[in-house]
Image (tube, rainbow, N blue to C red):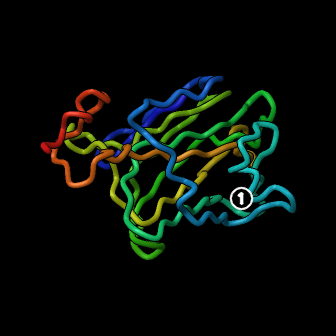
Amino acid sequence: MATESSEGEDESKMVGGNQQLMVEDDLREMANKAAWSVSSCKPGNGVTALRDDNLDTYWQSDGAQPHLVNIQFQKKVKLQLVVLYVDFKLDESYTPSKISIRAGDGFHNLKEVKTVELIKPTGWVYISLSGNDPRETFVNTFMLQIAVLSNHLNGRDTHVRQIKVYGPRLNPIPHQPFQFTSREFITYSTVR
């Protein structure tokens, strides 16, 4: 289970997790456009284990908390959803229990966007970056930082098996003011 909170909101709690990764069609994976780094890792359990699409590998931190995953983009991007795969059954005290998501232009001005408390999660955990206002559907940022603040059973190091970051899919027709979704509308969207 997980709970979420954004600025000015109480912390949210999440229990469980989904075994299948399911993301809406209007979102696209943005993480391959970024430079990834971690605060620490055990040899062989670094950033590549977070991005290899293999649920049997994991990033294992090696040091004092908080454990950080830094995702830096070359240009400002719109991000809407962060999805983590964690497994309490396999990782026990290495499983994160409290996660903070921060956004900003760089390390110097990161602001907390969400805080999530996980309760024995097994599977994909979805963390929406949208705010309290319905018009705030995404975060526009150069950098996203995922901080593991604490682990289950007071564990020191952490295991995270996968992280995916999603943003809104761009309009397929440049300079088009409308967001057409069907092929038929897109076909007839220009005048000859």
Residue 126 picture location, percent across and down: 51, 34
Residue at 73 percent across and 38 percent down: it is: 153
Q: Amino acid at mark 1?
A: Val
Point out the residue furthest to the left here. Answer: 191
Residue 61 picture location, percent across and down: 75, 57
Relative placement, left or right, of 84 versus 179 is right
Q: Nearer the viewer, residue 103 or 21?
A: 21
The vertical placement of 89 against 106, above or below, is: above
Point out the residue furthest to the right here. Answer: 43
Relative placement, left or right, of 132 versus 77 is left
Residue at 65 percent across and 23 percent down: it is: 19
Point out the residue furthest to the bottom here. Answer: 108
Residue 13 visible to the viewer: no
Residue 119 visible to the viewer: yes
Image quadrant assignment for residue 70: bottom right
Q: Nearer the viewer, residue 173 or 118?
A: 173
Residue 136 picture location, percent across and down: 25, 45
Indicate the quadrant containing the C terminus: top left, top right, bottom left or bottom right: top left
**Residue that carries the numbered disc 1 in the rendered image:** 47
Point out the residue furthest to the front here. Answer: 192
Image quadrant assignment for residue 81: top left
- Is label 1 in a helix, a strand or a loop? helix
Indicate the quadrant containing the N terminus: top left, top right, bottom left or bottom right: top right
The vertical placement of 107 against 173, above or below, is: below
Image quadrant assignment for residue 131: top left
Residue at 69 percent across and 38 percent down: it is: 152
Residue at 87 percent across and 62 percent down: it is: 43
Residue 98 picture location, percent across and down: 57, 43
